[in-house]
Image (cartoon, helix red, strand yellow):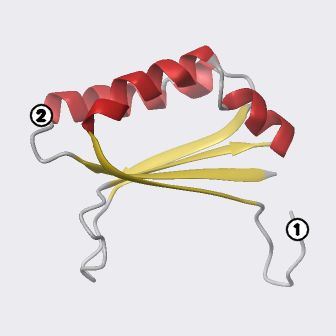
Amino acid sequence: MLRHVVIFQWKPETPETTIREIEETFSALPDKIPQIIGYEWGRDISVQGFDRDYTHVFVVTVASEADRDVYLPHPDHMEFIALSRPNVEKILVLDYVPTDVAGERN
């Protein structure tokens, strides 16, 4: 299993309606890309003040690196990138293989 985490900071001038469209477009990907076996997203609600103006996190779960490699260039994912990219101030992307508390890979 592999988690693909994307964290966004939007340009200040990005309208809320565009941000909602981006949220909806990303949220539609699991129905369009069979390699996605898990998906969640949310807006930052932390009170610690370490967000550095990042507001949105999207987490996509796939079964393997090979499935991630199918997901990334998928036309529907590329459509999402084309929609979001002009509105991105900063982005952070991390991929990881989850481990359990004993340090075993899941």
Whole-angstrom CA distance, mark 1 to mark 2, is 41 Å
Label 1 SS: loop
Q: Quadrant of residue 32?
A: top right
Q: Where does the image place residue 21, in percent across and percent down from the top left?
A: 29, 25
**In the image, which disc is placed on residue 15?**
2
Provide residue 84's location: percent of width, then percent of height. 35, 31
Q: Residue at 88% of width from left, 68% of height from top?
A: 105
Q: Report the front residue among 34 and 52.
A: 52
**Going by the image, does 90 lie left or right of 75?**
left
Q: Residue furthest right?
A: 104
Up the image or down, 96 lies above or below 4; here it is below
Whether residue 74 is visible: yes
Question: Callout 1, which amino acid?
Answer: Arg
User: Mark 1 sits on what residue?
Assistant: 105
Residue 3 sits above or below residue 29 on the image: below
Q: Position of residue 71 (x, y in %)?
A: 69, 29
Q: Is residue 2 above or below residue 39?
A: below
Image quarter for residue 64?
A: top right
Residue at position x 29%, y 31% in the image: 86
Type of the residue with mark 2 = Pro
Q: Residues within 10 Å of mark 1 (few under 14, many from 20)?
A: few
Instruction: Pick the residue in front: 30 or 90.
Output: 90
For residue 44, what is the image quadrant? bottom left
